[in-house]
Amino acid sequence: MEAAAAIRTFFSSSSVAAKPRRLLAGLDSRRALALEAPLPPRAIASSRAPLVVSSPPPPASAVPAPAHAKVDRSGRFCSPRAARELALMISYAACLEGADVVRLFDRRVSARREPGFVFDKACLLSYNHMSFGGGPLEVGTEEEAEKLTNQNEKDSANEAEVLSAPPKLVYNNIVLRLSRELLVAVASGWDKHVDIINKVIPQTWKDEPVARILELCILHIAMAEMTSKATPHKVVINEAVDLAKRFCDGGAPRVINGCLRTFVKDHVDVAGTSQPAESKP
């Protein structure tokens, strides 16, 4: 009964703020505690690739150097991808708190820093928006495996430090404005997109909506961007897939890609505005 109620709660057409708290009904305590964390699971390296010891190790030249995050002269993130990541974190937290996404964003941006809080902006240079999970990594020795494991732990700690810092210290004003615009679009289009999402996602996601909060938030953000901004559809879909690669596990990127392509085909006209679901077969 509780699981069915959770499904109806997420996929019903009601206000954004009315849904999320009841999503946690029926979960075991460990899973519930994990979902109550303020950051998406991937921010704490939930999908780092496992290590497999093999021989020989790959040549050093074959390992690409990590791409650094884009920062402006003030040392803050300035890329649209950072805005989408921030919008995803706020949406995720709003679902867990049962809060309005825009009000939660405004509250976090305007929140005062805790006394004694110090943020090292060097963390931003080590943060990689293009760090994705993947298959097992092959290394030649146990020492190399331990070294890569330690590096993964450092990267994960760095991500947690960046994503939990006050937004004004991490993102410039352009990113903050874009992120808020996305969240306003998410809120205004929520009811319409809930109905569409319920039709395009697989049954397994409907059966476990609580475990798919991140994926569903990514869909809402992408659909909102397509219908409210002039961003090309291919760009929005690629960005959504990359968010899924970064913060979700399993086949989520492939499913999100398919859902958004269906959304574009059946519910978005040439001008980029959303059409009623019944306007196309």
Image: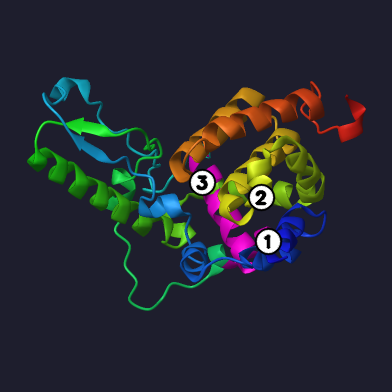
Q: What is the spatial separation of the Cα atoms under label 1 and label 2, in whole angstroms?
A: 8 Å
Tell me whether circle 1 and circle 3 mark residues in contact (CB < 8 Å): no
Query: Which residue position holds label 3?
Result: 85
- Return the x and y of residue 128 as percentages of the image width and height: 35, 40
> Residue at the spot x=46%, y=37% of the render?
245
Query: Which residue position holds label 1?
Result: 3
- Return the x and y of residue 198 as percentages of the image width and height: 75, 43
For the residue marked with disc 3, what is the amino acid?
A: Glu
Camera-side residue of 5 and 258: 5
| Label 3 vs label 2, nearer the camera | 2
Which residue reaches farthest right?
A: 279
> Residue at the spot x=65%, y=68% of the render?
21
Camera-side residue of 198 and 82: 198
Regarding mark 1 in the picture, which secondary structure is present there? helix
Regarding mark 3 in the picture, which secondary structure is present there? helix
Q: What is the spatial separation of the Cα atoms under label 3 and label 2, in whole angstroms?
A: 26 Å
Query: Which residue position holds label 2?
Result: 207
Residue 96 magenta-drawn? yes
Residue 75 magenta-drawn? no
Q: Quadrant of residue 170?
A: bottom left
